[in-house]
Amino acid sequence: MKKKKVKFRSDCPLSTALDIFGDKWSLLIIRDMVFKGRSTYGDFLEAGEGIATNILADRLAILECFRIISKHKHPESKAKVLYKLTSKGIELIPVLVEIISWSEKHHDVHPQAAEFVKMIKKDKVGTIKALYQQFKKE
Amino acid sequence: MKKKKVKFRSDCPLSTALDIFGDKWSLLIIRDMVFKGRSTYGDFLEAGEGIATNILADRLAILECFRIISKHKHPESKAKVLYKLTSKGIELIPVLVEIISWSEKHHDVHPQAAEFVKMIKKDKVGTIKALYQQFKKE
DNA sequence: AAAACTACTTGTTATTTGCAAGTAATTTTA
DNA sequence: TAAAATTACTTGCAAATAACAAGTAGTTTT
């Protein structure tokens, strides 16, 4: 994999964030890790939106480069790579939650997502905490 | 301007949101409207990151198409167009706030942004409310 | 030992971006 | 009041990026 760009457009935090994940795919990979427990290359390919293999490889490399995910041995298969969110990646959960809430309010989305947004409205802090829980090391 | 894509990749709220503003520029335009009071084509061109004129025109058209911004007469000049956030656009403020907070925590950003994040940490609800205030109609 | 799985890479083509320049309708300046 | 400057764009083109199809190299299953 070729060296990744490390130059940010400005020192604005928003533009820096968009330099990292401002595209149509990166946050979907993170969504799959947070909400669907996906963790391998094959898992991510199966996401409904149909990411291309080269784009997936590229985005995984970028996310790893910025320490949002990290690669690990898969406990069950040597052929697989296990991708895990770092704490920096886990901390994107509130961003996902706000985008999902906004989008659900203004568009037609699938019923399961609408249910999830109801939970958020009732208890945002609790819902986010529960999502964090699954990444607690034991 | 050619017709805009209205087809979403899936009915996932996150992917739908990314279909709309999942790129390196759209949220920066909204940032300029929320945090810098910018409202004209020329204003947006002046943003530090240096957006190209064709990209700006394209993004403004997309944001208008999805009713995130709307075009109005400029009160002082017939030559200018006044862009305003719709309520749908204003409601992206919490998304911006979460991205900014995350980014500030994990990267070096300019001091003014760091100050803003301090405010958010002290009183997130109040800070967001204050941002909403400026768009209140009188 | 062969077939299938997994995580990629390598083309090739289509689309998007970045940059420079141009345009048409106002304003401002001389 | 005619020329210059502003403003909000569009156009053209080269470069970069994305999508799609196919290939490859380990690993695991049959």
Image (cartoon, coloured by chain):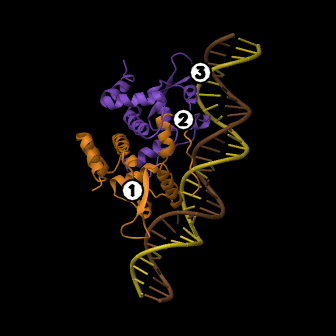
Chain colours: A purple, B orange, C yellow, D brown
Q: Position of residue A137 (x, y in %)?
A: 37, 21
Identify the chain of the residue marked 2, using the numbered disc in the image: B
**Residue A112 seen in the figure:** yes
| Label 2 crowd (10 A; few <14 / some 14-19 / many >=20) | some
Q: Mark 1 points at which residue?
A: B84
Q: Residue at x 48, y 36 (%)?
A: A108
Q: Quadrant of residue C8?
A: top right
Type of the residue with mark 1: Lys
Q: Name the residue under label 2.
A: B10
Q: Residue at x 47, y 32 (%)?
A: A30
Type of the residue with mark 2: Ser
Position of the N terminus of chain A, as image quadrant, is top right
Observer-nearest residue: A126 or C18? A126
Q: Where is residue D21 in the image (x, y as percent from the top left)?
A: 72, 35
State whether residue D23 is above or below residue A23: above
Q: Name the residue under label 3.
A: A79
Judge left or right: residue C20 versus residue A14: right
State whether residue D9 is above or below residue A11: below
| Label 3 crowd (10 A; few <14 / some 14-19 / many >=20) | few
Secondary structure beneath dot 2 equals loop
**Residue A10 seen in the figure:** no
Identify the chain of the residue marked 1, using the numbered disc in the image: B
